[in-house]
């Protein structure tokens, strides 16, 4: 169990993590979701005692991280694939970690086998692909057979087979009663693995909810309609008490799953329909709506509607 | 080793009750691996694996031994060929190991810096500190392992060169017990401490090239600057720079010095011991304070 209470981290003027309070419970996969720069990694670094919080507190089973006498058997963490010395072999990398926590050497062979790196155990980490580096990082996290596992963007750089593997790994670890905390910026990925969801944006907590609740609340279903007799259809639907939303590109949207009713109404009034399709808003859209105001680095897909700040303005005050 | 408790501001109205939440309520998973309370010994074993498993260790120490023995034997052979036994009277034969030592110290400095700074360069430091959250313990373990490796390597090289010097230069005096002690044990401790100081600077600077540059500057700059201080009014400064420059302090171990005043006997060892201790305390304080 990981408990955060009012966790805050400031870098000068900039607030990276703002007053986060939530609990990561054992036995389930908790997804930690937020756009790039939301403060996910900073939060994880504070959990692991790497960064000191400006204020607030984070505890692992009731203890501060630096009070843990056998940290690797408490928490296994995959921070990023590059947190290793490239000149050292995979085996020696894991061996020095095992020794620092008094973990038996045979455990090194076991985890190498688990992640499928036994064949390249004596090879230098420098020559590893991103996916192999990620697997080595996961081997390090599993080394102490910990009751809490923390993965920072674990699917980055993995091929589909690797992604499938890590999803199953996380689920099976949680099923054994462990606490699994995994960060991602992909809602679709979380929808497949996480049971619980913590969403942050610009360092603030935006949602702390179960995955099922999040889906129920956010997966809006609606019916999309295209018709050349737009005004007539609007009148008919209005008379029938159906609320219609006009979207910009000439289509109409009706909330709720009422495509049969609309089709029958249109047939009664002999209105031509070019499209009548039930739609489901994706979780990705729901996530983007939730975090829309807190996205730090916007990409401009169309012409900027307001004058662009001068180049370099964004860097001032950093 | 206990680390100071970070202060825990109670700014939040809804701070959970940790005591109530503790206990066996959430031992969701219990590992079959026996739980070990880690101590400094574990960190030392880990650092030993680290230092022996990277190629830069073999390279720097290999070059160090080559320089020490190559230059040591070369100098001895040159002197033996160009001098009569009379020339060598009153000479301490161990002192001809100095040339190799001055150059070789650069290798020890490099290895010392890399032991700490390369972890920052590669990102390994995050993995290290997660595995061992007691930062002071990590620094202590690195220091102990590096110091031991540097000391043993230097002592073996210095002894080999000393034996060769005595065998080749038959006109020279037999070194006294005190000269033996200073010319082998003393100088090896000094070089290992110089390397340890580099390790500490590496931990403070967190950048390999920067820290190596600083250390080479510390070793060579005072002497070079003093060479070009021609003004009479700077005579005092020039004298001090000469006397306390590291090359001069090295040669004090062979009872040679550029001046008649300044450090003598075992003084250089006490000086670098003091400097290293202060730097260690500073590095420890910074390590505790800064984010990894």
Image (cartoon, coloured by chain):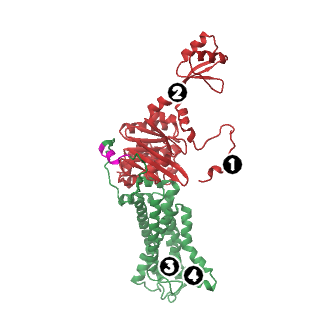
SS under mark 1: loop
Q: CA distance from mark 3 to mark 4?
A: 16 Å
Q: Nearer the viewer, mark 2 or mark 3?
A: 2
Q: Which mark is residue A310?
A: 1
- B113 and A248: which is toward the camera: A248
Q: Nearer the viewer, mark 3 or mark 4?
A: 4
Classify the position of the N terminus of chain A by image quarter: top left
Q: Quadrant of residue B44?
A: bottom left
Q: Residue A171's x, y, as percent?
A: 41, 36
Identify the chain drawn in green: B
Q: Residue at x 67, y 17 (%)?
A: A228
- B270 and A261: which is toward the camera: A261
Identify the chain drawn in red: A
Q: Residue at x 54, y 66 (%)?
A: B212
Mark before the other along the chain sequence, 2 or 1:
2
Q: Which residue is mark 2?
A: A220
Does the magenta segment cover residue A190?
no
Give the residues in magenta: B16-24
């Amino acid at each position: 169990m990981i408990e955060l209470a009012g966790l805050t981290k400031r870098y000068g003027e900039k607030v990276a993590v703002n007053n986060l309070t939530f609990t990561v419970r054992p036995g389930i996969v908790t997804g930690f979701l937020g756009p790039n720069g939301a403060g996910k990694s900073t939060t994880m670094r504070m959990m692991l005692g790497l960064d000191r919080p400006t204020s607030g507190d984070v505890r692992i089973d009731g203890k501060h991280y630096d009070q843990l006498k056998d940290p690797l058997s408490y928490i296994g963490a995959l921070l990023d694939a590059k947190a290793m010395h490239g000149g050292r072999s995979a085996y020696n990398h894991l061996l020095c970690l095992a020794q620092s926590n008094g973990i038996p050497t045979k455990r090194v062979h076991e985890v190498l086998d688990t992640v499928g790196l036994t064949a390249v155990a004596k090879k230098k980490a420098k020559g590893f692909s991103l996916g192999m580096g990620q697997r080595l990082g996961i081997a390090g996290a599993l080394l102490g057979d910990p009751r809490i596992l923390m993965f920072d963007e674990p699917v980055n750089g993995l091929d589909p087979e690797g992604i499938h593997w890590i999803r199953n790994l996380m689920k099976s670890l949680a099923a054994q009663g462990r606490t699994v905390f995994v960060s991602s910026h992909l809602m679709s990925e979380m929808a497949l693995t996480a049971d619980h969801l913590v969403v942050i944006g610009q360092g603030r907590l935006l949602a702390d909810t179960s995955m099922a609740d999040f889906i129920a609340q956010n997966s809006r279903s609606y019916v999309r309609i295209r018709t050349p007799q737009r005004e007539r259809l609007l009148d008919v639907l209005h008379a029938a008490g159906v609320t219609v939303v006009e979207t910009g590109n000439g289509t109409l949207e009706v909330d709720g799953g009422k495509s049969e009713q609309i089709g029958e109404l249109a047939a009664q009034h002999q209105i031509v329909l070019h499209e009548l399709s039930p739609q489901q808003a994706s979780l990705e859209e729901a996530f983007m709506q939730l975090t829309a105001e807190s996205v730090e680095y916007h990409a401009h897909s169309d012409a900027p509607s307001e004058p662009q700040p001068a180049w370099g303005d964004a860097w001032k005050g950093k | 080793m206990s680390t100071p408790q970070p202060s825990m501001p109670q700014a939040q109205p809804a701070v959970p009750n940790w005591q109530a939440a503790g206990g066996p309520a959430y031992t969701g998973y219990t590992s079959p691996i026996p739980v070990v309370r880690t101590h400094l010994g574990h960190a030392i074993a880990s650092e030993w694996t680290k230092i022996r498993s990277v190629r830069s260790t073999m390279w720097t120490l290999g070059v160090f031994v080559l320089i020490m023995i190559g230059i040591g034997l070369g100098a001895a052979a040159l002197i033996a060929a160009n001098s009569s036994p009379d020339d060598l009277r009153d000479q301490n034969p161990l002192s001809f190991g100095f040339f190799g030592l001055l150059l070789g110290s650069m290798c020890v400095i490099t290895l010392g810096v890399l032991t700490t700074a390369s972890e920052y360069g590669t990102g390994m430091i995050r993995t290290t500190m997660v595995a061992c959250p007691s930062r002071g313990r990590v620094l202590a373990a690195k220091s102990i392992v590096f110091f031991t490796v540097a000391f043993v390597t230097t002592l073996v090289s210095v002894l080999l060169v000393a034996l060769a010097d005595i065998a080749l230069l038959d006109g020279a005096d037999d070194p006294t017990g005190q000269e033996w002690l200073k010319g082998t044990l003393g100088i090896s401790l000094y070089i290992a401490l110089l390397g340890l100081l580099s390790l500490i600077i590496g931990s403070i600077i967190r950048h390999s090239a920067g820290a190596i540059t600083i250390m080479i500057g510390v070793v060579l700059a005072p002497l070079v600057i003093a060479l070009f201080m021609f003004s009479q009014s700077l005579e005092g400064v020039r004298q001090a720079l000469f006397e306390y420059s590291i090359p001069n302090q090295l040669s004090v171990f062979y009872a040679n010095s550029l001046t008649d005043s300044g450090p003598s006997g075992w003084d250089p060892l006490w000086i670098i011991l003091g400097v290293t201790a202060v730097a260690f305390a500073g590095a420890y304080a910074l390590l505790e304070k800064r984010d990894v």
